[in-house]
Structure formats: structure tokens, C-alpha cells
Image: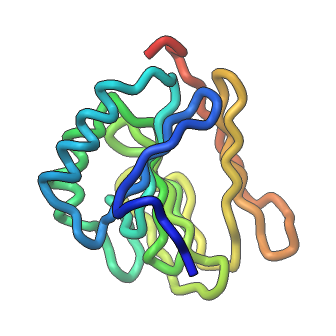
Amino acid sequence: TWVMPSRYYKFTKGNIDFLALDTEKFGEKQNQWIKESLRDSKTPWRILFGHHPVYSYGEHGHTRQLIDKLLPVLKSKVDFYLAGHDHDLQVIAKDGIDFYVSGTAAKARVSQSGSGTLYASHALCFMHLLIEGDTATLTVLDKNGETVYQREKKKRDLKS
């Protein structure tokens, strides 16, 4: 059983703020909380994560409500948005944010590419994101632990 501290919450590890979202019941109160959390953030790296992706070229597609309401709040303030929901694997760079959809740990469906797609797969894979100093490295590993894709992102201003 998953036990969360609340429907949406924030925690800090080192130089990273993590914001956990309730994308099932996303509303204005949560959006205001995100705005305030990002405004008050003192860390250089910011990662948001929720079940539903903002952008996805998988079976379920984009989440319109998150594009309309959440995305304007995230631009220029967030480095990564992590999600699942679609049972494929996607790396999308769009609107200055890296969007990672990782849903192929247990089962997979066909994935497509679209605007901003850097990598897409329907093979059983998982993602590993390592942030050290001003460098974030995403590694996609297959079911045998072999690297099938890697992307590095630099943080230009660690005081942001």
C-alpha cells in the first residue's frame, strides 16, 4: 500500500525540490500551491512528478488540463516533469522542460514520436535520473540492465 503525506506534497533532497502532484484531481487550489512552491524554492533543480503526463504520444495522449493549466506555471521554473500512465517510454524536450514518461517496467504498448520527441520505445525499460552538481544524466536501461539511451542536461545557473 502506498502511503503519501497528502494528495500533493513537496520534499527537498540535496539541491533538488521534488513536487508530487495529484493529476487525477488537478484543480486551482493545487495549481496555486505549485506556483507558491516554485516561487519559494531555493534549490537550483526542480522536478515535478505525477501519474498523468503533460505530453505523451502514447495510447492516452496529452493531458489537456495539464497543458492548459499547469504548463504555463512550469515554464522557466521546472527542469523535469516525470510521469507514467501510458505503458511506453518517452523522452520529450518541449517548452524548456524535459518530460519523461516511464511506463514500461511491467508491460508495454506501442509508442509514437511527435513534436519534441528525443527518444521513444515500447520495449520493457526503466529510467534512471542522476543529478550531480550542474549535470543531470538520464539513462534508459533495458530489461537486462543495458543502456539503450542517455541524455545529459546542464543547469546553467545554479543560483536560480
The answer to whether residue 14 shows anywhere in this view is yes
Q: Nearer the viewer, residue 37 or 84?
A: 37
Front-lying residue, 67 or 116: 67
Q: Looking at the image, which residue is at 51% across and 80% down?
A: 87
- Above or below 24: residue 157: above
Q: Colour mode?
A: rainbow
Q: Position of residue 68 (x, y in %)?
A: 14, 54
Quarter residue 103 falls in: bottom right
Quadrant of res 137:
top right
Residue found 64% across the figure and 22% down from its top = 134
Assign the N terminus to one quadrant of the image: bottom right
One can see residue 55 in this view: no
Image-based side of 130 in relation to 30, left or right: right
Residue 65 x/y as whole percent: 17, 63
* Quadrant assignment for the C terminus: top left
| Horizontal and vertical percent position of residue 147 | 81, 58
The residue at the point 40 percent across, 26 percent down is 41
Task: Depth check: give the residue in front, 149 or 126.
Answer: 126
**Which residue lies at the image location 23% right of the left edge and 70% below the top edge?**
25
Please determine whether, in this image, residue 10 is positioned above or below residue 111.
above
Question: Quarter-wise, where is residue 122 in the image?
Answer: bottom right
